[in-house]
Image (spheres, rainbow, N blue to C red):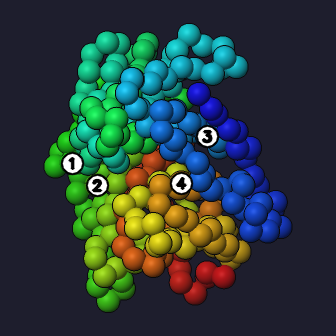
């Protein structure tokens, strides 16, 4: 098991960063490794992003020793998506098959978590996001068609997309985690444009479903001080509350978003007027 740490960055510090420093602080390029669980722990809302690609045998998720807790979910909850082949998540010995497009909510208090591929030749690729928790909720599989589905954008704006809210108060109870998936329509390229910030909550995006030669130009920074990150398939970005988070791709793509912080109001956003962007 491998876990890297990302310290919190202030907007005053971020505006001095060159490309390499921006990428080291806000981009996660190495989440998925065959036969491994890899994690990145961000000190913004203590969000952990993880990738698990089980081969011939299941991979067990353990709490890092430094956490001083008995198991990974002693004081945490998490959401899991599978963006690869067939697989299951084993929770306290019970197998929960997780097809691509569905989401699994795993509450605080589950003692053992393991990830399993049905066929090591086309392994499952699990993406998980975990945030601190204080209460137990139910284990839930949220199927793609149970999620809240929202159609947004227009062809004219090249931002037509389908947003699905899975871990969301109307669908599945959680302590603070919100999680969902947005798929950009063919011919559209933009996500989250017009853009917003929400200083009450931080966010993470995992971009996926991209051909190897395509890229998303992800925009971040304070609205009057924007920067970009060039993002390839299955790379994730960390977005502090002060930062915008939107992107334009060289083709269409999907992304899994997650949020943590003071509230679970999906619509709690400070929209940025186009004329205010710099
Ligand atoms: O606060 C909400 C998040 O930024 C995303 O859910 C936005 C998004 O998926 C989209 O507009 O496509
Ligand atoms: Zn947002």
Q: What secondary structure is found at the residue carrying circle 4?
A: strand
Task: Please tell me in which quadrant of the rendered image residue 27 appears.
Answer: bottom right
Q: Nearer the viewer, residue 210 or 270?
A: 210
Q: Residues within 10 Å of mark 2 (few under 14, many from 20)?
A: many
> How many circles with numbers are drawn on the protein?
4
Q: Which label's residue is closer to the chain start, 2 or 3?
A: 3
Residue that extends furthest to the left in the rendered view of this protein: 145
Q: Residues within 10 Å of mark 1 (few under 14, many from 20)?
A: some
Residue that numbered label 3 is attached to: 40
| Image quarter hosting the C terminus | bottom right
Q: Which label's residue is closer to the chain start, 2 or 4?
A: 2
**Between marks 2 and 4 in the image, the one whose residue lies nearer the viewer:** 4
Residue that numbered label 4 is attached to: 236
Q: Which label's residue is closer to the chain start, 4 or 3?
A: 3
**Between marks 3 and 1 in the image, the one whose residue lies nearer the viewer:** 3
Q: Residues within 10 Å of mark 3 (few under 14, many from 20)?
A: some
Where in the figure is residue 196, as x and y percent of width and height? 51, 67
Where in the figure is residue 99, as x and y percent of width and height? 24, 41
Q: Is mark 3 within 8 Å of ligand 1?
A: no
Q: Nearer the viewer, residue 197 or 117?
A: 117
Q: Is residue 16 left or right of residue 63?
A: right
Q: What secondary structure is found at the residue carrying circle 3?
A: strand
Tell me what residue is drawn at x 39 percent, y 46 percent.
179
Q: Which label's residue is closer to the chain start, 1 or 2?
A: 1
Residue that numbered label 2 is attached to: 164
Tag 1–tag 2 contact (CB < 8 Å): yes
Per the model, the C-alpha gap separating discs 1 and 2 is 8 Å
Where in the figure is residue 186, as x and y percent of width and height? 28, 76
Tell me what residue is drawn at x 80 percent, y 65 percent.
17
> Is residue 116 positioned above or below 152 on the image?
above
Q: Which label's residue is closer to the chain start, 4 or 1?
A: 1
Residue that numbered label 1 is attached to: 144
């Amino acid at each position: 098991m491998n876990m890297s740490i990302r310290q919190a960055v202030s907007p005053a510090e971020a505006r001095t960063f060159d490309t390499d420093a921006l990428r080291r602080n806000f981009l996660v390029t190495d989440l998925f490794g065959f036969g491994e669980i890899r994690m990145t722990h961000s000190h913004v809302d203590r969000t952990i992003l993880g990738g698990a690609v089980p081969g011939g045998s299941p991979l067990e998720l353990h709490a890092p020793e430094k956490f001083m807790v008995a198991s990974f979910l002693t004081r945490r909850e998490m959401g899991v998506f599978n963006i690869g082949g067939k697989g299951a998540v084993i929770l306290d010995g019970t197998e929960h098959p997780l097809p691509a497009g569905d989401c699994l909510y795993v509450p605080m208090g589950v003692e053992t978590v393991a990830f399993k591929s049905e066929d090591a030749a086309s392994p499952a690729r699990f993406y998980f996001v975990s945030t601190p928790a204080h209460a137990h909720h139910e284990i839930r599989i949220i199927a793609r068609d149970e999620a809240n589905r929202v159609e947004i954008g227009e062809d004219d704006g090249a931002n037509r997309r389908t947003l699905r809210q899975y871990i969301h108060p109307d669908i599945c109870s959680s302590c603070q985690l919100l999680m969902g998936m947005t798929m950009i329509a063919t011919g559209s390229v933009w996500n989250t444009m017009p853009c917003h910030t929400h200083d009450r909550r931080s966010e993470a995006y995992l971009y996926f479903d991209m051909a190897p030669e395509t890229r998303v130009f992800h925009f971040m920074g304070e609205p009057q001080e924007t920067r970009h990150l060039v993002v390839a398939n299955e790379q994730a970005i960390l977005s502090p509350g002060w930062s915008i988070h939107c992107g334009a791709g060289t083709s269409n793509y999907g992304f899994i978003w997650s949020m943590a912080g003071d509230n679970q109001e999906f619509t709690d956003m400070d929209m940025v007027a186009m004329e205010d962007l710099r």
